[in-house]
Image (cartoon, rainbow, N blue to C red):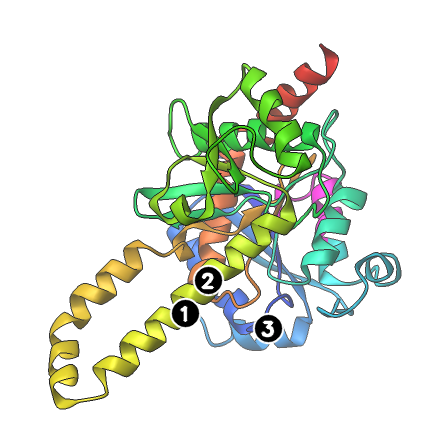
Amino acid sequence: MSEMINIALDGMGGDYAPAEMVKGAVRATKELNNVHICILGDEEKIKAELANLSYDSERIEIVPTTEVIEMAEPPVNAIRSKKDSSIVRGMYLVREGKCDAFVSGGSTGAILVGGQVIVGRSKGVERPPLAPLFPTSKGFSLLVDCGANVDSKPSQLVQFAKMGTIYMRELMGIENPTVGIVNIGAEEEKGNTLVKETFPLLKECKDINFVGSVEARDIPEGPVDVMVCDAFVGNVILKLYEGTASTLMKIIKKSMLSSLRGKIGGALVKPILKKSIASYSAADQGGAPLLGLKGLVVKMHGNSKEVECAAAIRQCVKFYEADMINKIASSIGKADSE
């Protein structure tokens, strides 16, 4: 029997918690035979959700907590004051080696603070970035950073590129991932101070396959495997992408329902359109791991449901089996000692 991988799941994090988190946990245990899940949160609420489902009670455990960190709370104060929250308790399970990963759709700020303060950074890592997989016409690209470090330094972006390269090579099977820096033009002399100072460092870095700048308009085509930027730029890209996709779907739906011809045409293309949209979705790819920590922490989108939750758990299993924590630590630690 394969080694059992222990995942701590924030049962109270996200817009649809705990119901969808519990469903996601049950789904993951049915899809994977080597995972044990600790669901942290309100015991009675979690029990009530589990009562409606068929599941293996030996592989799903409830870890009762009495506090919840709300989205609007100041992250540092929340981590310090709410010691019995699902986020803090989950982080400690990873820190103490009782769980191999922590997954949450809760407060991004609290997860970022908890990841660094409780789980801790690997030696040599300056700043851990959030790294989601980004759907493109060619498959998926990794966006590093999308929300953890609004003000980054050139040396940190170089580390992001190294960590992203390891991720895409080890987990996505891309032998020599291409790396690009998000910029306002293709020319090397373009960009703000951060980009101009980072560009030559990326060119000189022997651990990555740097191919130059990536303009925002080219991102949907998937010009590179790893897109490097500070979190301010990355978060704008991510949210604009999500908003544009949502708006386009509303426009298409409205157009199809505006006339009888549109309704007939819509009925005909619906199966094809649905399949195309599904292939362009990142829902089954998991969440955004906080790279460069001593343990694995994965941030799901706040509106994640059962499918996304189960995908994030699968992602943790792949991450663990690929020994990503040690590979990233070894890569960054080696560079730090040179």
Label pair 1/2, CB-CB below 8 angstroms? yes
Q: Amino acid at mark 1?
A: Ser
Residue 242: which disc? 2
Query: Which region is colored magenta?
Result: 90-102
**Where the C terminus falls, by quadrant?**
top right
174 or 27: nearer the eye?
Answer: 174
Q: Is residue 299 left or right of residue 23?
A: right
Q: How far across and down, in percent of the image, does residue 325 sit?
A: 61, 31
At a point 59% along the width and 49% down the height, the residue shown is 233
In the image, 63: left or right of 33? Answer: right
Q: Position of residue 318 (x, y in %)?
A: 47, 38
Circle nearer the N terminus (1, 3):
3
Q: Is residue 67 visible?
A: yes
| Disc on the earlier residue, 2 or 3 | 3
- Local SS, label 2: helix
Could you say which is closer to the camera, residue 263 or residue 93?
Answer: 263
Residue type indicated by callout 3: Lys
